[in-house]
Amino acid sequence: MTTKKNLVKTMFMNILTAGIFATVLASCTSPMEDISEGLVNGVADKMLDSKGQKEREEKQKQERLDILLNWNIGSEVDQEAIDKFGYDNCFQATEVPASLWDKAGLNTNSSDVDINDLRFVRCLIYTYAINGYAPRVGGLICNKRIAGDLVSIFRQLYEAKFVVDQDGTIPMVQQQGMAVVVISEEPLTSNDLAVRLFKERGFTWGGDEPNGNPNYFSK
């Protein structure tokens, strides 16, 4: 009798356990679906965020490259954009774009300068920035006779990280385009790299003249 009683008891416990397990499993179905859906949604959100971030980064890269493609004077650029645009392309003498005539105070009827004798020198300049220093798009209009000199001088100044200040305007053409003012934080001295480079190219330095402008060079 004891054996039969124990057998019945065991069978009953197995049935009861199976029922409890089935009930628990059924009750967990909905939460498990919620968990799975949450994981899927989380992964999808991360993928979308990653794609959006990548698109924003690519857009920013293109905007920085466009600054050089359009040669927006006074705008900051980064090394990645410079490399993509081409370093040598950042230091060139070209024809004067018509859009710059007014900025430089020039017009085709000017009596003191022949437009055909002028060139636009584009260059990168090393300037102060919010987080230290940064490359900036620069440029000036000069006589074609000194254009090559200025391309070389400003390239050397940039590579030496000589700080030059320039906003988004074009310096006025002076002395038939044969003179230039280098804007720096402090007046230039005879020891400054800019003075040495200009003198090596045969320019006269204003600092050598009584009451002369130490930032002024002419040829």
Image: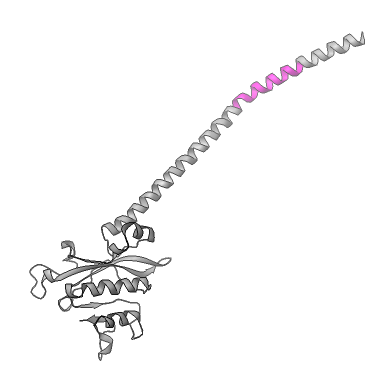
Start and end of the magenta stretch?
Answer: 16-31
In the visual, does 27 lie left or right of 155?
right
Total number of numbered discs in the rendering: 0
Is any atom of residue 165 visible in this view? no
In the visual, does 171 lie left or right of 24?
left
Visual colour scheme:
one colour
Q: Give 128 or 158, whichever is nearer the viewer.
A: 158
Quarter of image, res 187: bottom left
State the image coordinates of residue 208 (x, y, percent, origin top left): 27, 89
Q: Is residue 23 magenta?
A: yes
Q: Residue at x 42, y 44 (%)?
A: 52
State the image coordinates of residue 46 (x, y, percent, origin top left): 49, 41
Q: Residue at x 14, y 77 (%)?
A: 176
Q: Residue at x 73, y 17 (%)?
A: 18
Quarter of image, res 106: bottom left
In the visual, does 102 lie left or right of 207?
left
Q: Residue furthest right?
A: 1
Quadrant in which the C terminus is drawn: bottom left
